Image (cartoon, rainbow, N blue to C red):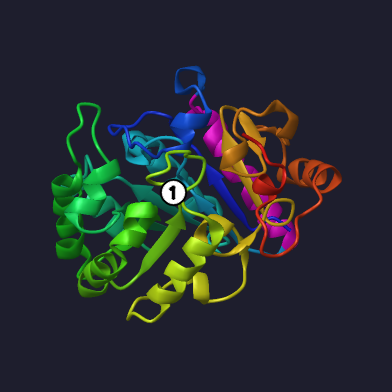
Amino acid sequence: MIDRSCISLSSKCQLSCTYCHFDTRIDKNGVEQISDKDALKVIYNFHQYASANQTGVKIGLVGSGEPLLRLDRIKEIVYTAERIDPDGRLNFYTISNGMFFTEDTCKFFFEHRERIKLCFSLDGPQKIHDLCRRTANGKGSYSTVVKSIQLYRETFGEAPSINATVHRETLRNAESVLNFFEENFKEVTFSKLVDVESPHLRIGKEDFQNFMELARTRNLALRQFNSRKYDCTMYGRLCGVGRTNIYFDNGKVYPCGRFVGNRKYELGTVRDSIDVIEKNMVERITPCTDGQCYHDTLNLQ
């Protein structure tokens, strides 16, 4: 049963992160942004599916770009969900780079915090964060995202949830990175760098697992160790491809974000019902063994 999904709202971004796997795999200039009509169609379809199956669905309003550049679309999705789904079967989250985060934006997320969770991308202290997360002119984004996080703290009365990418330099500076997060945040999701061949950044599965075991000794809330749910191995969980996850981008539906642009793995369109998409998924995809990544088992480049 599908209980997790991501909807890419836009491929546009203010940053040019050197390790962005979307930049390395797809031509963003050819990506069609989801329209308001289609975005709401997906939400209605998910509500119908969740109601019929008496289940909940967690939907990430994230993707190949910065979601807050389409704050108008996020608002319409949230307002619609609150109207048609009083039982709260649909819940949302989004992850921002923090480059354009205003008081009004923060107020919206605070007022609708029961329906949508806002997270920020932060890779660690400035030296580590600015290594890869830069603007097009090469300027690091650390100082800007830290200001956005401070605004969140002042409004919510607590630190936000953080998403941090783990690469080779993270491992080389593991103690200082983990100290930084332990001293400043409570909830952190570490994600393994994928689809980047740069030898100075690339890490293996065992490297990531060893880092996570070290992180586990710290006073941090790590979703990877809450339960063995099907989600994504990039986050240290079990692969949900063919089981629980689908990904919307460029008008199509894929098993996960790493398949965007691969026609062979299109499971439907944004206008198809979730039942149809699920049927296609079950018929065409045999889930991989627990502990493996479906994309990696195909050895796709």
Task: Give the percent coordinates (x, y) of residue 251.
Answer: 60, 28
State the extent of the magenta-drawn residues as a range: 33-53
**Picture layout, residue 28 above or below residue 62:** above
30 or 23: nearer the viewer: 23
Residue drawn at x 22%, y 65% as measured from the top left: 156
Q: Please, which residue is most extreme toward the top here?
A: 30
Q: Quadrant of the C terminus?
A: top right
Residue sitting at the far front:
199
Q: Looking at the picture, tell me which residue is in the foreground, 168 or 278.
A: 168
Q: Is residue 35 magenta?
A: yes
Write the residue at 55% across / 59% down. Answer: 205
133 relative to 116 in the view: left or right: left
User: Measured from the top left, where is residue 72 in percent x and y?
Assistant: 35, 36
In the drawing, does residue 82 fall left or right of residue 288? Answer: left
Is 26 placed above or below 8 here? above
- For the stretch drawn in magenta, the main secondary structure is helix
Relative vertical location of residue 53 with respect to residue 73 in this rendering, above or below: below
**Which residue sits at x=39%, y=40%?**
19
Whether residue 29 appears in magenta in the rendering, the answer is no
Q: Nearer the viewer, residue 104 or 153?
A: 153
Image quarter of residue 174: bottom left
Judged left or right of residue 213, residue 249 is: right
Q: Which residue is mark 1?
A: 78
Taking the image as drawn, is residue 1 in sight?
Answer: yes
Query: From the viewer's perspective, is 85 left or right of 78?
Result: right
Label 1 secondary element: helix
Q: Nearer the viewer, residue 288 or 109?
A: 288
Where's residue 300, x and y in %? 66, 37
Residue at 51% over, 75% down: 225
Q: Amino acid at mark 1?
A: Val
